[in-house]
Amino acid sequence: MSSAGTEQEKQVKDENTIELPRLYRVLLHNDHYTTMEFVVYILRNIFNKSHDEAVRIMLKVHREGIGVAGIYIRSVAEAKVEAVHQIARENGFPLKCSISPE
């Protein structure tokens, strides 16, 4: 086969390739004021974690200072961070949440 045919095949493959969106970790940060129970509530209600998984993540945040609440595409990750900050603010907690590329 000629190199022109190979180049054409490559071009067709490139056009059919779907690029997946980049994923981001949503991180919860420890502080000295937000209660453990509230962090579990956030993990269960915003991140849809089971009770056991929420407790496990909360303890990791408590012990290590940071923990992954979930992994999402950027728009979803940003929406989760905003939801956490809004609910924390409404409840008088300074809970911080951020995103980091996977």
Image (tube, grey):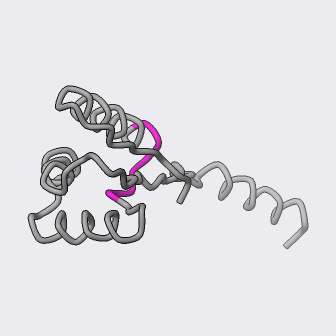
Residue at left 38%, top 43%? 96
Quadrant of the drawing holding the N terminus: bottom right
Judge by depth and name the residue closer to the eye, 13 or 94: 94
Direction left: furthest residue: 51
Where 29 sits versus 1, above or below? Answer: above
Direction right: furthest residue: 3
Judge by depth and name the residue closer to the eye, 49 or 67: 67
- Tell me the magenta residue range: 69-75
- Quadrant in the rendering for residue 64: bottom left
Query: How many numbered marks appear?
Result: 0
- The reply, left or right, for residue 80 in relation to residue 92 is right
**Percent position (x, y) of residue 92?**
22, 31
Q: Is residue 72 magenta?
A: yes
Q: Is residue 26 magenta?
A: no
Judge by depth and name the residue closer to the eye, 5 or 16: 16
**Percent position (x, y) of residue 5?**
82, 62
- Look at the magenta stretch and give its main secondary structure: strand
**Percent position (x, y) of residue 63?**
35, 71
Where 54 sits versus 88, above or below? Answer: below
Judge by depth and name the residue closer to the eye, 6 or 68: 68
Residue at left 65%, top 58%? 13
Residue at left 25%, top 63%? 58
- Quadrant in the rendering for residue 14: bottom right
